[in-house]
Amino acid sequence: MAPPVPASGYSRHMLLSELDATACAALVRNGDAEPAELVELAIARIERHDPELGAVTIPLFEEARAAAKDVPHGPFRGVPILIKDIIASVRGALHTEGMRPLKQARHSYPYDSHLVASLRRAGFVVIGKTNTSELGILPTAEPPAWPPTRNPHDLTRSTGGSSGGSACAVAAGLVPIAHANDGGGSIRIPASCCGLFGLKPSRGRISFAPNYGDINGGLVNEHVVTRSVRDSAAVLDILAGPQPGDPYTAPPQLTTYAAEIAVPPRPLRIGFATRHLVPEGGLVESHPDCVAAVGHAARLLEALGHHVEPVEITALHDPEWVPRFLSIWAVGVAMDVEEAARDIGRDIHPHELERLTWAIAELGKLVTGPGYAAAWRWIQRASRRIATYWESYDLWLTPTVTTPPPVLGTFASPPDDPLAGIFKAAEFAPFTAPFNATGQPACSIPLSRNADGLPIGVQLVAAYGREDLLLRVAAQLEAAQPFTHPATRR
């Protein structure tokens, strides 16, 4: 259940630390708060708590104060939001993508991307940018350009990533909502690690205009991490839809996503699995905490009237998945490094990047044109085999990640094995990346915590274009077991 809108006389302290974005917007709409007040509260919370968290790398406080004086009368008028420091551009703001060369060159764009402009028109006030792994490669937020982002549930642990700064800020109550993106799990993974709701939309649902048509052939998606399902649905209504020049777009939604979540889903047929493929071959079970989280979610879904049974999708067990996906990703990293070099007007050298980033970029240069095309053809054929599952089932339930939030430094690569980090990442998040490849929507739902109090998310996956179904089921689960946010800073 989403946080209620408090009556007049609400606690100012509660405003950002307890409420979701929808409730904050209602306070402004009802005259119980002003946009400038929300912005100042967010700034104060960031200044107080972020030094220990490391979520906000690029404060934009003065720009936010100026924007709060004349905010469009959109559905989220006056609500502060943070933008992840990769892909989406904020006019005039430092844009680093976790890279020291871009940071040192003070790289920026002279315009807002479509996503940021849409959020502003809806009334959001951008108050800063958040941490990410270098080029968004790893499922953590520990880039060389900035100090690491720490999990607000346990400061020794990772937030997940690559949208780790955004997830940390929302989980800690610095802001009620933050932008995120996802090329292999980077919305869902930090949502799981930080105890939030995170939806990766269908391929082509949200435009990358004006800088990109798609990214890495369509692996990457934009959206937000949120404290409630209703926030995710409402922002998807704001962002969804094509822009001129988009190479493709997802099928249009006939009703609003915000309206969809008010309609309980019919009884559904849902399969679940908890085993994953490992590089040395064979299937292994996920961590007991993650298995328990899936079991809990399955029982809750059954209590809500759905049929739930164990089902493996065997097309996901092919060992070719990792090398095919990595070939595509490596080409993208090589291109990103070359583009960054053009942006700053000089070559980028190995010592300026993480050894993993440099190794993947060099690997990408070795992938031939036919090799890249062959990787996509293999994935497209595998995607067709995977899609047959949704002819018999409505949803698939899995762990979001295979272990509880790992300690900081887990994904660092040693000097003698520069690719070690990416293979650790593949073992940590084998359930997320395949659905970037297939283009299907998937979400992480915060229904469990382990004995140490660490969040353990579960993933639901729907057929292509069916964000409506994911949001309806997620809202049903949230109503049955309201999301809580114990990491909120006081």
Image (cartoon, rainbow, N blue to C red):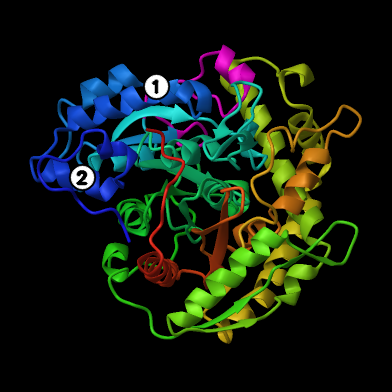
Q: Which of marks 1 and 2 is nearer the N terminus?
A: 2
User: Which labelled disc corresponds to residue 227?
Assistant: none
Residue at the location (54% across, 70% down)?
Answer: 297
Task: Indicate the position of residue 379 as horizontal and vertical percent values.
Answer: 71, 64
Residue type highlighted by circle 1: Arg
Q: Which residue lies furthest to the front in this view?
A: 451
For the residue pair 356 and 247, the one nearer the viewer reads as: 356
- Per the image, the residue denoted by label 2 is 25
Disc 1 crowd rating (10 Å Cα; few below 14, some 14-19, many 20+) is few
Residue at the location (66% across, 14% down)?
Answer: 346
Residue type highlighted by circle 2: Ala
Stretch of the chain drawn in magenta: 84-111
For the residue pair 58 and 2, the one nearer the viewer reads as: 2
Residue at the location (63% across, 17% down)?
Answer: 101
Quadrant for residue 102, please give it: top right
Observer able to see residue 398: no
Secondary structure type for disc 2: helix
- Per the image, the residue denoted by label 1 is 48
Q: Which image quarter holds the C terminus? A: top left
Q: Is the magenta stretch mostly helix, strand or loop?
A: loop
Disc 2 crowd rating (10 Å Cα; few below 14, some 14-19, many 20+) is many
Depicted 108 relative to depicted 89: above or below: above
Q: In this view, does 329 lie to the left or right of 456?
A: right
